[in-house]
Image: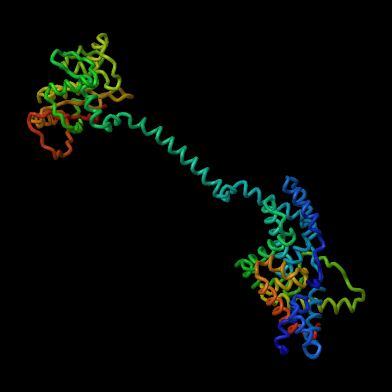
Amino acid sequence: MMDCSEIRTLLSEYLDDALDEKAKALADEHLRTCPACREELDSLKTLVKGIGSLESVKAPADFLDQLHKRMERRSRISERWGWLFYPLRMKIPLQLAGAAVMAFLIFSILPLQQAPLRLYSKSEPEKRVEEKTYYVDESKEMKPVGRSEALVQKAATGGPAKDKETREVALNLKKQVRAKATPEPSAAPAPAPPAALEMQRQKLATRAPLQEDKKEDQLEKEPESVLSITRAIETAKGKLLSIDYNQQTGRPESIHAEIPAGEISLLYEKLKELGDLQVSPETRTEKDSELIHVRIRLIGLP
Amino acid sequence: MNGGTKRPVTSSGEDALLIKAFQRGDKRAFDQLVIRHKDRIFNLCYRFIGDYEEANDSAQEAFVKAYGSLKTFRLESAFSTWLYRIAVNTCKNKLGSSSYRAKRKTVSLDNPGNNEVGALPMEIQNGTPSPLARMEEKERRRLVQTALDALPAEFKMVVALRDIEGLSYEEIAQVTGLNLGTVKSRIARARTDLRNKLRGVL
Protein backbone atom coordinates (compact mmCIF):
# COMPACT_ATOMS: atom_id res chain seq x y z
CA MET A 1 0.00 0.00 0.00
CA MET A 2 1.32 3.39 -1.00
CA ASP A 3 1.02 6.50 1.12
CA CYS A 4 -0.38 9.82 -0.15
CA SER A 5 2.99 11.49 -0.85
CA GLU A 6 4.09 8.55 -3.01
CA ILE A 7 0.79 8.55 -4.89
CA ARG A 8 0.96 12.28 -5.54
CA THR A 9 4.23 11.95 -7.37
CA LEU A 10 2.48 9.53 -9.73
CA LEU A 11 -0.64 11.61 -10.34
CA SER A 12 0.80 13.54 -13.28
CA GLU A 13 1.59 10.31 -15.11
CA TYR A 14 -1.68 8.78 -13.96
CA LEU A 15 -3.47 11.66 -15.58
CA ASP A 16 -1.64 11.06 -18.87
CA ASP A 17 -2.27 7.32 -18.62
CA ALA A 18 1.49 6.83 -18.70
CA LEU A 19 1.86 4.51 -15.68
CA ASP A 20 2.60 0.84 -16.08
CA GLU A 21 -0.08 -1.71 -15.10
CA LYS A 22 1.25 -2.35 -11.62
CA ALA A 23 1.67 1.29 -10.63
CA LYS A 24 -1.71 2.16 -12.10
CA ALA A 25 -3.40 -0.61 -10.08
CA LEU A 26 -1.75 0.66 -6.90
CA ALA A 27 -2.81 4.24 -7.63
CA ASP A 28 -6.38 3.18 -8.42
CA GLU A 29 -6.61 1.30 -5.16
CA HIS A 30 -5.34 4.29 -3.15
CA LEU A 31 -7.57 6.81 -4.91
CA ARG A 32 -10.67 4.69 -4.16
CA THR A 33 -10.01 5.09 -0.46
CA CYS A 34 -8.38 8.56 -0.27
CA PRO A 35 -10.60 11.60 -0.97
CA ALA A 36 -7.69 14.06 -0.53
CA CYS A 37 -5.68 12.44 -3.31
CA ARG A 38 -8.80 12.27 -5.49
CA GLU A 39 -9.19 16.01 -4.99
CA GLU A 40 -5.53 16.51 -5.88
CA LEU A 41 -6.04 14.55 -9.08
CA ASP A 42 -9.11 16.64 -9.99
CA SER A 43 -7.28 19.91 -9.48
CA LEU A 44 -4.44 18.67 -11.69
CA LYS A 45 -6.97 17.75 -14.37
CA THR A 46 -8.42 21.25 -14.18
CA LEU A 47 -4.96 22.78 -14.47
CA VAL A 48 -4.08 20.72 -17.54
CA LYS A 49 -7.38 21.69 -19.10
CA GLY A 50 -6.70 25.30 -18.23
CA ILE A 51 -3.27 25.25 -19.84
CA GLY A 52 -4.72 23.51 -22.90
CA SER A 53 -7.43 26.14 -23.19
CA LEU A 54 -4.91 28.93 -23.70
CA GLU A 55 -5.60 30.34 -27.12
CA SER A 56 -3.18 29.38 -29.79
CA VAL A 57 -1.36 32.46 -30.90
CA LYS A 58 -1.16 32.51 -34.65
CA ALA A 59 1.87 33.48 -36.62
CA PRO A 60 1.66 36.93 -38.26
CA ALA A 61 -0.24 36.92 -41.57
CA ASP A 62 2.91 37.82 -43.50
CA PHE A 63 5.01 35.13 -41.82
CA LEU A 64 5.93 33.49 -45.14
CA ASP A 65 6.88 36.82 -46.73
CA GLN A 66 9.05 37.67 -43.77
CA LEU A 67 10.65 34.27 -44.03
CA HIS A 68 11.38 34.73 -47.74
CA LYS A 69 13.01 38.08 -47.04
CA ARG A 70 15.08 36.61 -44.25
CA MET A 71 16.27 33.74 -46.40
CA GLU A 72 17.08 36.05 -49.29
CA ARG A 73 19.11 38.28 -47.00
CA ARG A 74 20.87 35.22 -45.61
CA SER A 75 21.74 33.85 -49.03
CA ARG A 76 23.16 37.21 -50.08
CA ILE A 77 25.42 37.13 -47.06
CA SER A 78 26.40 33.54 -47.69
CA GLU A 79 27.20 34.37 -51.30
CA ARG A 80 29.67 36.89 -50.05
CA TRP A 81 30.98 35.04 -47.02
CA GLY A 82 29.75 31.53 -47.62
CA TRP A 83 33.18 30.15 -48.49
CA LEU A 84 34.15 30.69 -44.86
CA PHE A 85 31.53 28.18 -43.88
CA TYR A 86 32.25 25.55 -46.51
CA PRO A 87 32.71 22.14 -44.98
CA LEU A 88 36.35 21.19 -44.47
CA ARG A 89 36.10 18.37 -46.98
CA MET A 90 35.64 21.04 -49.64
CA LYS A 91 37.92 23.65 -48.14
CA ILE A 92 40.99 21.46 -47.63
CA PRO A 93 41.28 20.28 -51.26
CA LEU A 94 40.81 23.87 -52.40
CA GLN A 95 43.58 25.07 -50.10
CA LEU A 96 45.85 22.23 -51.17
CA ALA A 97 45.28 23.13 -54.80
CA GLY A 98 46.12 26.73 -53.99
CA ALA A 99 49.29 25.68 -52.19
CA ALA A 100 50.30 23.51 -55.14
CA VAL A 101 49.85 26.42 -57.54
CA MET A 102 51.92 28.66 -55.26
CA ALA A 103 54.66 26.05 -55.00
CA PHE A 104 54.70 25.65 -58.77
CA LEU A 105 54.99 29.41 -59.28
CA ILE A 106 57.76 29.75 -56.70
CA PHE A 107 59.80 26.89 -58.14
CA SER A 108 59.35 28.12 -61.68
CA ILE A 109 60.47 31.67 -60.81
CA LEU A 110 63.39 30.88 -58.47
CA PRO A 111 65.61 29.08 -61.04
CA LEU A 112 65.31 32.07 -63.38
CA GLN A 113 66.66 34.39 -60.73
CA GLN A 114 69.35 32.03 -59.55
CA ALA A 115 70.55 30.84 -62.94
CA PRO A 116 74.10 32.17 -62.51
CA LEU A 117 74.42 30.50 -59.13
CA ARG A 118 73.37 27.09 -60.34
CA LEU A 119 76.92 26.24 -61.32
CA TYR A 120 78.13 26.32 -57.74
CA SER A 121 75.63 23.89 -56.48
CA LYS A 122 76.75 21.07 -58.70
CA SER A 123 78.28 18.10 -57.00
CA GLU A 124 82.06 17.95 -56.85
CA PRO A 125 82.70 15.06 -59.24
CA GLU A 126 80.45 16.62 -61.83
CA LYS A 127 82.33 19.89 -61.48
CA ARG A 128 85.68 18.27 -61.93
CA VAL A 129 84.71 16.77 -65.21
CA GLU A 130 83.15 19.99 -66.32
CA GLU A 131 86.25 21.94 -65.47
CA LYS A 132 88.35 19.59 -67.50
CA THR A 133 86.13 19.36 -70.48
CA TYR A 134 87.80 22.32 -72.03
CA TYR A 135 91.33 22.38 -70.95
CA VAL A 136 94.18 24.52 -71.99
CA ASP A 137 97.22 22.84 -73.34
CA GLU A 138 100.63 24.08 -74.21
CA SER A 139 99.86 24.51 -77.89
CA LYS A 140 97.29 27.19 -76.97
CA GLU A 141 94.49 25.35 -78.54
CA MET A 142 91.37 24.11 -77.02
CA LYS A 143 90.08 20.62 -77.50
CA PRO A 144 86.85 19.32 -76.28
CA VAL A 145 87.49 16.15 -74.43
CA GLY A 146 85.25 13.50 -73.07
CA ARG A 147 84.92 12.48 -69.50
CA SER A 148 87.46 9.67 -69.62
CA GLU A 149 89.99 11.83 -71.44
CA ALA A 150 89.46 14.50 -68.85
CA LEU A 151 90.35 12.09 -66.10
CA VAL A 152 93.42 10.94 -68.02
CA GLN A 153 94.44 14.53 -68.59
CA LYS A 154 94.01 15.27 -64.95
CA ALA A 155 96.15 12.32 -63.96
CA ALA A 156 98.81 13.35 -66.47
CA THR A 157 99.08 16.87 -65.07
CA GLY A 158 99.57 15.43 -61.63
CA GLY A 159 96.26 16.69 -60.34
CA PRO A 160 95.25 15.28 -57.01
CA ALA A 161 93.02 12.24 -57.14
CA LYS A 162 91.13 13.16 -54.03
CA ASP A 163 88.18 15.55 -54.04
CA LYS A 164 89.19 19.11 -54.05
CA GLU A 165 87.08 22.04 -52.95
CA THR A 166 86.84 25.11 -55.04
CA ARG A 167 87.87 28.19 -53.14
CA GLU A 168 85.53 31.09 -53.54
CA VAL A 169 86.86 34.60 -53.48
CA ALA A 170 84.97 37.77 -54.28
CA LEU A 171 86.67 40.67 -56.01
CA ASN A 172 85.19 44.14 -55.91
CA LEU A 173 87.09 45.90 -58.66
CA LYS A 174 88.52 49.36 -58.19
CA LYS A 175 86.94 52.19 -60.11
CA GLN A 176 89.72 52.72 -62.58
CA VAL A 177 89.72 49.05 -63.48
CA ARG A 178 85.96 49.12 -63.70
CA ALA A 179 86.03 52.14 -65.96
CA LYS A 180 88.14 50.23 -68.41
CA ALA A 181 85.80 47.33 -68.19
CA THR A 182 83.55 48.60 -70.92
CA PRO A 183 85.71 49.15 -73.95
CA GLU A 184 85.00 52.14 -76.15
CA PRO A 185 83.87 51.34 -79.64
CA SER A 186 86.62 53.47 -81.13
CA ALA A 187 89.33 51.86 -79.08
CA ALA A 188 92.12 50.14 -80.89
CA PRO A 189 92.07 46.37 -80.83
CA ALA A 190 93.09 45.18 -77.44
CA PRO A 191 96.52 43.71 -77.10
CA ALA A 192 96.61 40.01 -77.68
CA PRO A 193 95.19 38.43 -74.60
CA PRO A 194 96.89 35.60 -72.86
CA ALA A 195 96.42 32.38 -74.67
CA ALA A 196 94.33 30.81 -71.98
CA LEU A 197 91.85 33.61 -72.14
CA GLU A 198 91.33 33.08 -75.79
CA MET A 199 90.15 29.62 -75.07
CA GLN A 200 87.77 30.57 -72.35
CA ARG A 201 85.96 33.47 -73.83
CA GLN A 202 83.07 31.32 -74.84
CA LYS A 203 80.46 30.97 -72.22
CA LEU A 204 80.85 27.77 -70.37
CA ALA A 205 77.19 27.08 -70.65
CA THR A 206 77.11 27.10 -74.41
CA ARG A 207 79.55 24.23 -74.74
CA ALA A 208 79.85 24.86 -78.44
CA PRO A 209 83.20 24.16 -80.00
CA LEU A 210 85.07 27.37 -80.47
CA GLN A 211 84.56 28.87 -83.88
CA GLU A 212 87.48 30.61 -85.46
CA ASP A 213 85.49 33.35 -87.14
CA LYS A 214 84.14 34.59 -83.81
CA LYS A 215 87.54 34.87 -82.19
CA GLU A 216 88.27 38.45 -83.19
CA ASP A 217 84.93 39.83 -81.99
CA GLN A 218 85.24 38.11 -78.68
CA LEU A 219 88.74 39.39 -78.30
CA GLU A 220 87.76 43.00 -78.70
CA LYS A 221 84.91 42.76 -76.29
CA GLU A 222 86.91 41.17 -73.55
CA PRO A 223 86.72 43.63 -70.63
CA GLU A 224 89.88 45.08 -69.23
CA SER A 225 89.03 43.75 -65.78
CA VAL A 226 89.13 40.17 -66.97
CA LEU A 227 92.47 40.76 -68.64
CA SER A 228 93.97 42.13 -65.41
CA ILE A 229 92.77 39.13 -63.47
CA THR A 230 94.07 36.78 -66.12
CA ARG A 231 97.46 38.40 -65.84
CA ALA A 232 97.34 37.99 -62.08
CA ILE A 233 96.61 34.30 -62.52
CA GLU A 234 99.52 33.93 -64.91
CA THR A 235 101.81 35.69 -62.48
CA ALA A 236 100.81 33.15 -59.86
CA LYS A 237 101.74 30.34 -62.28
CA GLY A 238 98.11 29.40 -62.43
CA LYS A 239 95.98 28.18 -65.25
CA LEU A 240 92.78 29.82 -66.35
CA LEU A 241 90.06 27.25 -66.60
CA SER A 242 86.91 29.12 -67.45
CA ILE A 243 85.11 32.42 -67.43
CA ASP A 244 81.43 32.43 -66.58
CA TYR A 245 79.22 35.04 -68.09
CA ASN A 246 75.85 36.13 -66.91
CA GLN A 247 73.40 34.70 -69.37
CA GLN A 248 71.25 37.80 -69.38
CA THR A 249 73.72 40.68 -69.30
CA GLY A 250 76.61 38.94 -71.04
CA ARG A 251 79.00 40.38 -68.45
CA PRO A 252 81.71 38.23 -66.89
CA GLU A 253 80.65 37.00 -63.50
CA SER A 254 83.37 34.73 -62.31
CA ILE A 255 86.74 33.40 -63.34
CA HIS A 256 87.80 29.90 -62.52
CA ALA A 257 91.45 29.03 -62.29
CA GLU A 258 93.83 26.37 -61.07
CA ILE A 259 96.66 27.71 -58.95
CA PRO A 260 99.56 25.86 -57.30
CA ALA A 261 98.97 25.97 -53.55
CA GLY A 262 102.30 27.64 -52.97
CA GLU A 263 101.36 30.56 -55.21
CA ILE A 264 97.88 31.20 -53.88
CA SER A 265 98.96 34.07 -51.62
CA LEU A 266 100.70 35.68 -54.57
CA LEU A 267 97.45 35.53 -56.53
CA TYR A 268 95.56 37.11 -53.66
CA GLU A 269 98.11 39.91 -53.49
CA LYS A 270 97.84 40.60 -57.20
CA LEU A 271 94.05 40.58 -56.97
CA LYS A 272 94.14 42.99 -54.03
CA GLU A 273 95.89 45.46 -56.32
CA LEU A 274 92.87 45.35 -58.59
CA GLY A 275 90.23 45.86 -55.90
CA ASP A 276 88.71 44.70 -52.62
CA LEU A 277 89.25 41.00 -52.19
CA GLN A 278 87.10 38.98 -49.87
CA VAL A 279 88.56 35.60 -49.04
CA SER A 280 86.69 33.23 -46.82
CA PRO A 281 88.97 31.74 -44.17
CA GLU A 282 90.41 28.45 -45.36
CA THR A 283 91.05 25.71 -42.85
CA ARG A 284 92.55 23.21 -45.21
CA THR A 285 96.26 23.33 -45.86
CA GLU A 286 97.56 21.99 -49.11
CA LYS A 287 101.03 20.99 -50.12
CA ASP A 288 102.75 23.61 -52.23
CA SER A 289 102.74 21.42 -55.28
CA GLU A 290 99.00 20.76 -55.10
CA LEU A 291 96.73 22.59 -57.47
CA ILE A 292 93.92 24.59 -55.95
CA HIS A 293 90.76 25.53 -57.77
CA VAL A 294 89.90 29.16 -57.25
CA ARG A 295 86.74 30.83 -58.41
CA ILE A 296 87.03 34.61 -58.49
CA ARG A 297 83.62 36.20 -58.42
CA LEU A 298 83.50 39.66 -59.88
CA ILE A 299 81.31 42.07 -58.01
CA GLY A 300 80.63 45.68 -58.66
CA LEU A 301 81.07 45.42 -62.41
CA PRO A 302 78.88 47.87 -64.29
CA MET B 1 -1.20 5.90 -24.53
CA ASN B 2 -1.75 9.60 -23.78
CA GLY B 3 -5.11 11.16 -23.56
CA GLY B 4 -3.44 14.08 -25.31
CA THR B 5 -5.18 17.40 -25.35
CA LYS B 6 -4.38 18.18 -28.97
CA ARG B 7 -2.89 16.03 -31.66
CA PRO B 8 -1.02 17.42 -34.61
CA VAL B 9 -3.52 18.42 -37.23
CA THR B 10 -1.11 17.90 -40.07
CA SER B 11 -0.81 14.48 -41.55
CA SER B 12 2.72 13.22 -41.86
CA GLY B 13 1.88 11.58 -45.21
CA GLU B 14 1.35 14.93 -46.86
CA ASP B 15 4.51 16.26 -45.23
CA ALA B 16 6.44 13.33 -46.65
CA LEU B 17 5.20 14.06 -50.17
CA LEU B 18 6.15 17.72 -49.86
CA ILE B 19 9.56 16.85 -48.46
CA LYS B 20 10.23 14.47 -51.34
CA ALA B 21 9.16 17.14 -53.81
CA PHE B 22 11.51 19.63 -52.11
CA GLN B 23 14.36 17.15 -52.20
CA ARG B 24 13.74 16.65 -55.92
CA GLY B 25 14.27 20.40 -56.37
CA ASP B 26 10.80 21.90 -56.02
CA LYS B 27 11.54 24.83 -53.71
CA ARG B 28 7.88 25.85 -53.52
CA ALA B 29 7.12 22.65 -51.64
CA PHE B 30 8.91 24.22 -48.70
CA ASP B 31 6.45 27.11 -48.70
CA GLN B 32 3.65 24.58 -48.34
CA LEU B 33 5.41 23.00 -45.38
CA VAL B 34 5.79 26.44 -43.79
CA ILE B 35 2.11 27.22 -44.28
CA ARG B 36 1.13 23.89 -42.74
CA HIS B 37 3.35 24.24 -39.64
CA LYS B 38 3.90 27.94 -39.04
CA ASP B 39 1.12 28.45 -36.50
CA ARG B 40 2.05 25.47 -34.35
CA ILE B 41 5.72 26.39 -34.39
CA PHE B 42 4.92 30.02 -33.73
CA ASN B 43 2.62 29.12 -30.85
CA LEU B 44 5.25 26.86 -29.31
CA CYS B 45 7.84 29.62 -29.55
CA TYR B 46 5.42 32.10 -28.07
CA ARG B 47 4.59 29.84 -25.12
CA PHE B 48 8.22 29.18 -24.56
CA ILE B 49 9.49 32.74 -24.87
CA GLY B 50 6.42 34.73 -23.85
CA ASP B 51 7.15 37.64 -26.20
CA TYR B 52 5.44 38.03 -29.55
CA GLU B 53 8.29 39.60 -31.50
CA GLU B 54 10.93 37.35 -30.05
CA ALA B 55 8.72 34.33 -30.72
CA ASN B 56 8.31 35.46 -34.31
CA ASP B 57 12.05 35.84 -34.69
CA SER B 58 12.67 32.37 -33.26
CA ALA B 59 9.98 30.74 -35.39
CA GLN B 60 11.42 32.34 -38.54
CA GLU B 61 14.90 31.28 -37.57
CA ALA B 62 13.69 27.73 -36.99
CA PHE B 63 12.26 27.57 -40.51
CA VAL B 64 15.45 29.00 -41.99
CA LYS B 65 17.42 26.24 -40.27
CA ALA B 66 14.91 23.64 -41.40
CA TYR B 67 15.28 24.87 -44.98
CA GLY B 68 19.03 24.44 -44.76
CA SER B 69 18.82 20.88 -43.45
CA LEU B 70 15.75 19.57 -45.25
CA LYS B 71 17.80 18.31 -48.20
CA THR B 72 19.37 15.70 -45.95
CA PHE B 73 16.26 14.98 -43.88
CA ARG B 74 15.39 11.29 -43.94
CA LEU B 75 11.79 10.39 -43.48
CA GLU B 76 12.56 8.03 -40.62
CA SER B 77 11.10 10.44 -38.08
CA ALA B 78 8.07 12.68 -38.37
CA PHE B 79 8.74 16.07 -39.92
CA SER B 80 6.72 17.82 -37.22
CA THR B 81 8.84 16.26 -34.44
CA TRP B 82 12.00 17.23 -36.28
CA LEU B 83 10.70 20.76 -36.76
CA TYR B 84 9.73 21.03 -33.09
CA ARG B 85 13.20 19.98 -32.14
CA ILE B 86 14.72 22.71 -34.29
CA ALA B 87 12.30 25.26 -32.82
CA VAL B 88 13.01 24.18 -29.24
CA ASN B 89 16.76 24.50 -29.77
CA THR B 90 16.35 27.87 -31.45
CA CYS B 91 14.25 29.13 -28.53
CA LYS B 92 16.70 27.74 -25.99
CA ASN B 93 19.53 29.55 -27.75
CA LYS B 94 17.55 32.76 -27.75
CA LEU B 95 16.70 32.49 -24.06
CA GLY B 96 20.34 31.76 -23.33
CA SER B 97 21.72 34.61 -25.43
CA SER B 98 23.05 37.57 -23.49
CA SER B 99 21.37 40.08 -25.78
CA TYR B 100 17.96 38.56 -25.04
CA ARG B 101 18.53 38.51 -21.29
CA ALA B 102 19.64 42.14 -21.35
CA LYS B 103 16.50 43.00 -23.25
CA ARG B 104 14.29 41.20 -20.77
CA LYS B 105 15.68 43.27 -17.93
CA THR B 106 14.55 46.52 -19.49
CA VAL B 107 10.88 47.42 -19.48
CA SER B 108 9.37 49.06 -22.51
CA LEU B 109 7.76 52.42 -21.65
CA ASP B 110 5.26 51.94 -24.43
CA ASN B 111 4.16 48.63 -23.02
CA PRO B 112 5.14 48.49 -19.36
CA GLY B 113 2.75 45.72 -18.42
CA ASN B 114 3.44 42.06 -18.73
CA ASN B 115 0.48 41.42 -20.99
CA GLU B 116 0.67 41.15 -24.73
CA VAL B 117 -0.88 44.41 -25.93
CA GLY B 118 2.12 44.92 -28.17
CA ALA B 119 2.48 46.86 -31.37
CA LEU B 120 1.99 43.70 -33.41
CA PRO B 121 -1.55 42.51 -33.85
CA MET B 122 -2.35 39.17 -32.30
CA GLU B 123 -4.95 36.95 -33.74
CA ILE B 124 -6.95 34.93 -31.27
CA GLN B 125 -8.41 31.74 -32.60
CA ASN B 126 -11.79 31.72 -30.90
CA GLY B 127 -13.80 33.84 -28.54
CA THR B 128 -16.41 33.12 -25.89
CA PRO B 129 -20.02 34.34 -26.18
CA SER B 130 -20.97 36.70 -23.35
CA PRO B 131 -18.87 39.81 -22.68
CA LEU B 132 -18.65 39.14 -18.95
CA ALA B 133 -17.78 35.50 -19.41
CA ARG B 134 -15.26 36.54 -22.00
CA MET B 135 -13.66 38.99 -19.59
CA GLU B 136 -13.48 36.36 -16.85
CA GLU B 137 -12.11 33.81 -19.25
CA LYS B 138 -9.59 36.31 -20.52
CA GLU B 139 -8.43 37.12 -17.02
CA ARG B 140 -8.15 33.45 -16.14
CA ARG B 141 -6.03 32.77 -19.20
CA ARG B 142 -3.85 35.73 -18.42
CA LEU B 143 -3.17 34.33 -14.97
CA VAL B 144 -2.39 30.89 -16.37
CA GLN B 145 -0.05 32.43 -18.92
CA THR B 146 1.63 34.52 -16.22
CA ALA B 147 2.16 31.45 -14.05
CA LEU B 148 3.50 29.55 -17.05
CA ASP B 149 5.85 32.39 -17.94
CA ALA B 150 7.21 32.36 -14.40
CA LEU B 151 8.34 28.73 -14.71
CA PRO B 152 12.00 28.05 -15.37
CA ALA B 153 12.58 27.54 -19.10
CA GLU B 154 13.29 23.81 -18.92
CA PHE B 155 9.95 23.22 -17.14
CA LYS B 156 8.00 25.62 -19.28
CA MET B 157 9.12 23.84 -22.43
CA VAL B 158 8.03 20.35 -21.44
CA VAL B 159 4.67 21.57 -20.13
CA ALA B 160 4.04 23.54 -23.33
CA LEU B 161 4.89 20.53 -25.46
CA ARG B 162 2.68 18.24 -23.39
CA ASP B 163 -0.33 20.34 -22.38
CA ILE B 164 -0.46 22.87 -25.21
CA GLU B 165 0.96 20.97 -28.17
CA GLY B 166 -0.29 17.58 -27.00
CA LEU B 167 2.91 15.65 -27.68
CA SER B 168 3.42 12.24 -26.05
CA TYR B 169 6.18 11.76 -23.48
CA GLU B 170 8.21 9.88 -26.05
CA GLU B 171 7.84 12.66 -28.60
CA ILE B 172 8.84 15.23 -25.99
CA ALA B 173 11.92 13.16 -25.20
CA GLN B 174 12.79 13.14 -28.91
CA VAL B 175 12.17 16.84 -29.35
CA THR B 176 14.07 17.98 -26.28
CA GLY B 177 16.76 15.33 -26.28
CA LEU B 178 15.94 14.56 -22.63
CA ASN B 179 15.45 11.02 -21.43
CA LEU B 180 11.94 9.78 -20.76
CA GLY B 181 12.31 9.77 -16.95
CA THR B 182 13.43 13.39 -16.94
CA VAL B 183 10.52 14.37 -19.17
CA LYS B 184 8.01 12.69 -16.82
CA SER B 185 9.47 14.16 -13.65
CA ARG B 186 9.75 17.64 -15.10
CA ILE B 187 6.15 17.60 -16.27
CA ALA B 188 5.01 16.39 -12.85
CA ARG B 189 7.01 19.07 -11.06
CA ALA B 190 5.89 21.83 -13.37
CA ARG B 191 2.23 20.87 -13.00
CA THR B 192 2.48 20.72 -9.22
CA ASP B 193 4.13 24.14 -9.20
CA LEU B 194 1.47 25.65 -11.47
CA ARG B 195 -1.35 24.06 -9.53
CA ASN B 196 -0.03 25.60 -6.30
CA LYS B 197 0.25 29.03 -7.91
CA LEU B 198 -3.16 28.88 -9.51
CA ARG B 199 -5.16 27.60 -6.56
CA GLY B 200 -8.34 29.64 -6.40
CA VAL B 201 -8.04 30.60 -10.06
CA LEU B 202 -8.76 27.23 -11.63
Q: Position of residue B152 (x, y in %)?
A: 66, 75
* In the image: residue A239, left or right of residue A130: left
Which quadrant holds residue A12?
A: bottom right
* In the image: residue B121, left or right of residue A178: right
Q: Position of residue A268 (x, y in %)?
A: 12, 31
Q: How is the image coloured?
A: rainbow
Which residue is at 16% across, 20% downward? Answer: A153
Residue A201, placed above or below residue B161: above
Which quadrant holds residue B44?
A: bottom right
Q: Residue furthest front?
A: A22
Closer to the camera in the image, A168 or B12: B12
The answer to whether residue A39 is seen in the rendering is no
Closer to the camera in the image, B158 or A12: A12
Closer to the camera in the image, A262 or A162: A162
Residue B40, placed above or below residue A292: below
Which residue is at 78% across, 72% downward? Answer: B2
Quarter containing the C terminus of chain A: top left
The answer to whether residue A123 is seen in the rendering is yes
Q: Position of residue B78 (x, y in %)?
A: 74, 59
* In the image: residue B133, left or right of residue A195: right
Q: Residue furthest right?
A: B130
Quarter containing the N terminus of chain A: bottom right
Residue B13, placed above or below residue A41: above
Residue A245, placed above or below residue B168: above
* In the image: residue A222, left or right of residue B179: left
Which quadrant holds residue B110?
A: bottom right
Q: Position of residue B128 (x, y in %)?
A: 89, 73
Which residue is at 76% across, 78% downward? Answer: A21
